[in-house]
Amino acid sequence: MTTQTLPRSPEAWVGIVRSGPAPDQAPAVVTAVYRLWLVAFTLKMLGSTWDMSWHFKWLRDDFAPPHLLNTAGTVLVVALVLFQAYHSVGVDALAKRLMIGGTATFLVAIPIDVLNHRINGLDITAWSASHALLYTGTAFMLLGAARGYWISTPPGRTRTVVSAVLWGFFLENVLFPNQHQEYGVLSLQAWDAGTPTAEPSLLEFAAGQIGRAVDRVAVQGFALPVDSWVYPSWLAGAALLTLVAARLFVGARWTATCIAACYLGYRLFAWMLLAGTGFPKSIPPLLLLAGAIAVDVVFLALPTAPAPAATPLDGVVAARPAAGSGIGRVLLVSVFGAALATACLAGAAWLQDFVIGAPPISYPAFIWGGLVLAAGWALLALATRSRRTA
C-alpha cells in the first residue's frame, strides 16, 4: 500500500479528516501523516536556526520572520496531533500521550514566553525557564512521533532512516540552547574588533536593562550570560545521552555518528546561508562528532543486547538475551562508554578551540556531564534490556 491509494479530491480528504481512514487506506494515510511530521519539524528547525541568529542582530519581535516560520511548523504539528489522537491513526496510547502532552506544553509556553519578555525585557538567553518549556514540549512531541512511527511502520530501511531523522530533530532541539554561546563568543569578538554584528538599538536596549552605557561589560552580559561550565556539561550530559538513546532506539550500526554528522552538516549549511546574507555567524560544535563516534564504537565493540532494536518506548521483545548481557556487564559498559565518549568530546573540544575556536569551556565540567551520561546510559540500557528479556 502506497500513498497512491490516497484520495485525489478535496471532498474525499475532508471525509478522512472527519471520519478517519478506511482500513484499506490506513497504511497510506499513516505514511502521509509521518511525512507531514517531517515537513513540520523541518519548518520548526529552520525557524529556530534563523531565530537564534536573528536575535543576535536585531531587537526581538513577536512577528519576526523566523517566528512565523516556526509557527507554521507548530500549526501543522497541532493539526496532525488532533487528527491522530482523535482517530488513533499511527499511534498507541503512549505515543498519543507524548504527542498531546508535548504539544500542550509547547502551546502553554508560548504566552508564558511572550509575557516573560514583556516583564523582563530582552531576555535573550536561550537558557531561560520559559524557553525551557518550549524545548521540553518539542522533545515530547518528537518522542511521540518517533514512538508512533516505529510501531505503525513495518521494519526495513525506510523505518530505520526516518527514525534516525526524527532523532536528528531531537538532537537539534537539545542543542539549541547551546547555540547562545556559539553565537555569543563571536558576537563579543566582533565587538572587541570594533565591528559589532548587533544593531545599535539592540546593544543600547541590552545595556539599558542593566543600567550601563554600551560597553564591553554590557555586550558580554548580552552575548555570554551563562557560566563556562554550562556548554561542556550540556554537550556531554544531554547531547551525547541523546545519541545513546537514538542508538538504542534505532538499533542500526553507526546511528549516533550518522545523526551527529548530519546535524553538523546542517549547521554548516545554515552557517553559509546566514553568513552569506549578512546575519551573525556561529561556531558549530564540531567536537560532537568525536563523542558520537566513541558512542558507536562502544556499542559495536561491547554489545550488551541482541541485534534487533528495542527501546524503553517500544514493546518489542527479543527471543533471547545476548550472551554476557547481565546487569553487571550493562553497568560496566555504560560507565566505560560514558567515560570514553566524554574524554573524546573533551579532547575534540581542546582541538577545536585550538584550530577554529570554541565558546568558553570549563574543562572540569566535562566530568559532571560525563557522570550524568553514565547514569542515563545505564538507565536506558537496563530499561531496554528489561523489555527484551521480559
Image (cartoon, helix red, strand yellow):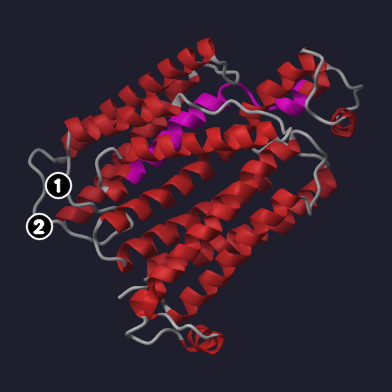
Judge whether residue 25 can be spotted in this image. yes
Q: Which residue is mark 1?
A: 306
In this view, 14 is above or below 230: below
Query: How crowded is the residue under tag 1: few (<14 C-alpha within 10 Å), some, or many (20+)?
Result: some
Per the rendered image, the range of residues in magenta is 220-246
Left or right: where 320 falls relative to 254: left
Residue 31 x/y as whole percent: 39, 69
Q: Residue 130 colored magenta?
A: no
Mark 1 and 2 residues: CB-CB less than 8 Å, in contact?
yes
Distance from disc 1 to disc 2, alpha carbons, whole Å, reads 9 Å
- Amino acid type of the residue that numbered disc 1 sits on in the rendered structure: Pro
Q: Main secondary structure of the magenta part?
A: helix
Give the label on residue 319, or none.
Answer: 2
Q: Quadrant of residue 60?
A: top right
Identify residue type, mark 2.
Answer: Ala
Horizontal side of residue 270 vs 306, given as left or right: right
- The circle on residue 238 is none
